Amino acid sequence: MKTDLLERITINSKVCHGKPTIRGLRYPVENILELLASGMTIKEILEDYPDLYSEDILACIKFAAETMFRKSASIAYPRKIINKTSKAKKVPKPHK
């Protein structure tokens, strides 16, 4: 893709209480993901929201994937950030 899809996702404290939205519009990413999860197709969403583009929907999916990747990495490796060249080391579990 010519431009990064994530550039379409914006966070502004004055729009939708600071939730990630599409292009600064009042379409929170989580709402679009809920529509997809409910079974709506991208085409159906675009018909219901004519000011959105297919790239906006794909950006929501990519944003969710990136968020989950970062969150799962921070849970799995809380004391060490792993990059592509380093090898994972066992980190002791915290005591309860």
Image (tube, rainbow, N blue to C red):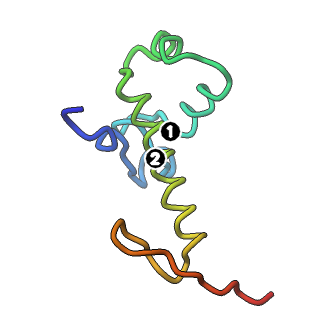
Q: CA distance from mark 1 to mark 2?
A: 6 Å
Query: Looking at the picture, does residue 17 appear above or below residue 1?
Result: below
Q: Position of residue 70 (x, y in %)?
A: 48, 60
Q: Is residue 16 positioned above or below 54 on the image? A: below
Q: Say what amino acid the circle numbered 1 marks.
A: Pro
Quadrant location, the N terminus: top left
Q: Could you say whether the residue bearing mark 2 is in a helix, strand or loop?
A: strand
Which label was assigned to residue 20? 2
Residue depicted at x 50% and y 39%: 29
| Outermost residue to the right | 96
User: Residue 55 placed where, x, y %?
Assistant: 35, 27
From this view, report whether residue 47 is shown above or below residue 4: above
* Direction from residue 70 to residue 1 in the image, left or right: left
Query: Dots 1 and 2: beta carbons under 8 Å?
Result: yes
- Identify the image quadrant of the C terminus: bottom right
> Which element carries disc 1, helix, strand or loop?
loop
Q: Residue at x 50, y 38 (%)?
A: 28
Which residue is identified by label 1?
A: 28
- Residue 36, image quadrant: top right
